[in-house]
Each structure stands twice: as structure tokens, then as C-alpha cells.
Image (cartoon, rainbow, N blue to C red):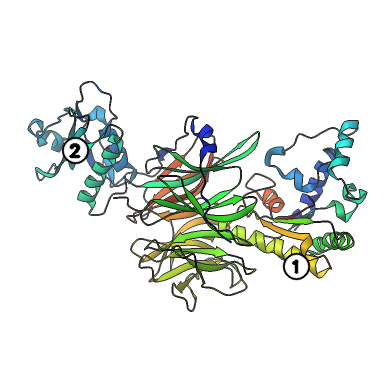
Amino acid sequence: MNLNIIVPALLLSVLVLSSCSSNPAQGRKAGGGAAPTLLGQGSTAHTAGLQDHGLPPAFSDPRSPLYQRVIYFDYDRSDLSPDAVEILRAHALYLSTHPNRRIRLEGHADERGTREYNLALSEQRALGVQRFLLAEGVGPEQLSVRSYGEERPAQLGHNEAAWAANRRVELVYP
Amino acid sequence: MWKPFPYLLLFFLGFLSKAQAQLTIEIVGGTEGAQPIAVVPFGLNTGGVQVPDLAQVIAADLARTGRFNPMPRRDMLVTPHRAEEVDLRDWRLQAMDNLVIGEIARRPNGYYAVHFILFDVFQGKELENRTFRSTHADLRYTAHRIADVIYERLTGQPGVFTTRIAYVTSTLGSDGERVVLRVADADGYNPQTIVSSRDPILSPAWSPDGRQLAYVSFEQGRTAIFVQELATGRRERVAAFQGLNTAPAWSPDGRQLAMSLSRDGNPEIYVMDLASRSLRRLTDDPGIDTEPAWSPDGQHIVFTSGRGGTPQIYQIPAAGGQAKRLTFEHDYNSRASYAPDGKSLVLVTRVNGQFRIGLLDLNRGTIRLLSQGDLDESPSFAPNGVMVLYATQYQGRGVLAAVSIDGRVTQRLSQEGEDVREPAWSPLLR
């Protein structure tokens, strides 16, 4: 259970250390992905501004629920935790007040169990998030769903910490 | 929605020109109880043309089954190539049950005549005495055919040395992941690229005639089911509906493809008629239904369903009807497929948190474990039913393993620097 708190916290600290431009979804490339950029370099800050074009400052504020764009799940489950609900309410509020904004919900599973079943499980997770956002007043045309199963892990490794980080739905603002 | 989707595989050519990575096979299990057999290096009458070492190919084929223990060459005191050169007393003294000799002759027309004789050493008689005609390029294949003949003569079951395996490899480079669907000979030789992608490819499934593969490929970020003709590389996208399009499985007559689609909001089992592309829905429940597989007589389909709270195997008549649960042992059972005789299922089962390959006896309803890993998956039967091929982890890497269904011998197929997964054993290709 504690992993559900520790992992996002770890992710957060990594992200703060790396460029402000990264959102949690982009920090996922196994083995590091984009090279971290040092804070305090003017050009980096500029790039971040371009990448988050149109997103309000709350999206880059680690204290804001909008900063959190990854929802985590328990093993073989697709129901939403209280933490997930809080994050999703904030995104629902933002999306329902910005009807031109689109969001992609990308479902994932950990590597345990079979690949096909995990594809289905990751879809159920993403669809669960979609249902919640719709119920909170987000327009159906604002939402799209993708399911990656265990094929796109956020973390490599065959241990509880990696598995917990990989059971997720990423909220991707294009 | 689905339309024929012909593709030229031109953009793969750059990739093909690189040296093809090849699977290497190690035998892990013991050989106690294996029959001693001597496969003498074949005589060469090829006018100096280099040819593969066919006796070695044959001996390696037989050894991999765990049922034969070929004599090391350094122990051979004589190396006859023709019947008149054989004195079976030499081989009795060395406790060989069987002896194989042979000769490769190059004909003026460029073809090769490969002659071999299989002896029963103790009864003192010839069991097989045949000549195969072969091109130079097919000599290794001819060795596999000879191994098939020997295996069938000595065990009563067809050999599977001329079959092939499909599998997916993944390499993580600086520019991201490269995923390749490959087909190789059953001994890992002669790997060929079927499709190469930056996105996941999974669930390769052989058509019953061995000429086509169905598989799932993520293209434009979504799953779609493709059917590809191996000889030409031409492929068609047969299912690309809203939601998931996964888990293709051919009916034994090759006319229908079972699959899991979530186009109606939840993964359900469908059967597609390949000629008309019409769909028939077989399941209807709020849980996940996926991983269908046909019984050898085409009458039933087994599939994985989460309807009971945990994934379990269910069976439904292929014509439609009531689903019946088949697994009651262990709290996670998935990806089942039938043995060629229809009497058992091979599946993935979770025991003490570890995912292993299990054999479900359909009469008794009990599961016997075949593997010892903790993340084993994707099992499929060899077409003669004596081995099961599956994916496992070894030293932190994805490798393939094949285990005899008596659990006695395991072989590991791995590829340097790559993850190998999603194996599928072809049908008999005669």
C-alpha cells in the first residue's frame, strides 16, 4: 500500500530535478528517456514554456493536483483509489471549464500475468478513468483512450517497486 | 471499418541487410534414460563443394528432444558411410541402440543425393534406407527431414524438426525500442524478419497450413489484427475496430479467426469468417474475455475470462452457447491452448505468486506444473504434442524455453542482447 505513495513521490522528485518541460507521462521512457536538463538554464526554461503552451502554471506546480498526471492502481484492479479521485476531480474541473482541451488516457499494466489479459486490464483502467471524467462533466469529445498492457513499462525491473510504477493510467495533454 | 491493407515491406530492407541475429539453443535438463544413438559423419562425394555437417544437424535435433543421447564423435572408433562398411559388433560393444550412416553425392545437374541408413544395432537390421534429393540451399532442411524419419521410426510419433517457430524480439537502443516478429527453423537457424516496428507486436498465430501468420500490431498507437502471407510478405488488416483488437486464433480448418474485441465497450470473444469478414459474438459478460483457442476438432473454444473475479479458463461451443469453467485450481489461469490430441490444455497458472506453465488434464481437472520460472508465459504445444514452447526470464532477459511434457528435459533458446518472447510453434509443414 505504501508504494502507492512512495512511487509517485519518487517520480515527483525525479521530475523536479529534470527539466520543467517534462510532464509525468514523458518521464516514462525506460532507462531514462530524454536526458535531464539542469535547472536555471535560460534556454531550458524557454523550451518548457513552449511545450506546455496553453497549460496554466498549476500544471507545473508540484503542489497542485493538476501536476499529477499519472493514476496508479492495485494489482489486477481497475478501481480508483481516493488519491486518484482527488487528482481526477482537479483534471475534470479543468477540462470541463476548457472544452477545447483534449486529453488522452493511456492505460498500462505491470508485467505479471499474460500479455493479452494485461492489455484488457489496462483498457479497463483507462475506461474507468474515462467514466469518472465523463461523470464529472467532461465532454466525450475531449477524451480518447489507448491501452498498452505491459508493453510500455514506466520502469524496467522485476520487483514490487517497478510493478507499482507500471500499473497506471497516464493523462496526456497533447 | 477493416479494409484490405496491402503493404510493401520495403522499409525493412535496410534492417534486413544487417547480420541476422540468431537464436542459440542450450539443453538444460538431464539425459538419463535417453536412447544411445550413433550418427556417423556423412561421407562426402561433392567434388570439393562445401556442404553443412548434416550428421551434426541430425544428432543435435535428436538430442534436443531429450529422448536420444547421441554418441560424441571422439568416441567413434570407425566411421562407415556405406552398408558394406558396417560391422554392427563395433557398435554393440559401445552399447549403441541405433546407428545412422549416410553419404552426400553431388549430381552433374547440381542437385545432391543424400542417402542414409538407420540400423537397429542389436537386432542387426536396417530400419530405414532412403535417399533424398536436395538443392544445396536445402541441405540443412534435408537433415531435418532425415531426423524426422528417424524420430518417427524409433518413437512412433512424428518428428517436428522440419517445423518452424515464430517469436518476437525486442531491443532497446538509444533511439527507443525496436520490435521484430521473426520466423526461424525449429533449431533457431535461418531467422527471417516478418515485420519490424517501433511499437509492440504480439500474439503471433500460425494458420493451420503454416503459410500465414496472424498477429497483433500497434500501429498509430492502437491495436489491430493483421494476417500476413509468409512467402510474399503481403498482409491485410482484418480487425481495427474501436477499442482492443487482440488475441487472434485460427480455426482448425483455417477459415475462421477467433479474437478478442472491445468494440462494444468490453473485451468479448468473436469469431470472424475470413472470406466474408463477418463477425459472430460468442460471449457477453461484464468481465474481460480474451485469449481464445480452438479445440483440435473445431467444436469448442477455450478462453480466459475475469467474470468470476480472477482470470480463469472457460470453454464455450464454437457455435455459441453456455460457457463452462474449466479451471478450479490456483487463483490465476490464463492463455490456454489445446494439446494436439485434445486431452489437455497448456496454460499460464499462478502458484505462490509465481507465474508458471501448467498442463491441465481435461478429464481429471488437475494442473501439473511444467516450468519453474516466476514470469513464464505464452505457452504453445509442438505439433506432435511432446514439447511445450514458452517464454521465460533468464538472467534478467526474456528467453524462450521448450520443455518435454514429461518435464524431463528443457531447452533454452536465447538471443544475445535481445529480449525474446511470444513464441508460437508452427503446425507440421509437410
Q: Amino acid at mark 1?
A: Arg
Q: Residue furthest bottom?
A: B322
Q: Amino acid at mark 2?
A: Val
Instruction: Locate residue B386 relative to residue A101 in the image: left or right.
Output: left
The residue that disc 2 covers is B100
The answer to whether any part of residue B253 appears in the image is yes
**In the image, what residue occupies the spot 32% across and 50% down?**
B429
**In the image, what residue occupies the spot 23% across and 52% down?**
B155
Q: Disc 2 sits on a residue from what chain?
A: B
Label 2 Cα crowd, 10 Å radius (few <14 / some 14-19 / many 20+): many
Q: Judge by depth and name the residue closer to the eye, B88 or B302.
A: B302
Instruction: Locate residue B21 relative to residue B42 in the image: left or right.
Output: right
The residue that disc 1 covers is A131
- Gap in Å between the C-alphas at discs 2 and 1? 68 Å
Q: Is residue A141 above or below residue B221?
A: below
Q: Residue furthest left?
A: B84
Occupied quadrant, residue A98: bottom right
**In the image, what residue occupies the spot 88% across and 62% down?**
A93
Label 1 Cα crowd, 10 Å radius (few <14 / some 14-19 / many 20+): few
The answer to whether any part of residue B376 appears in the image is no
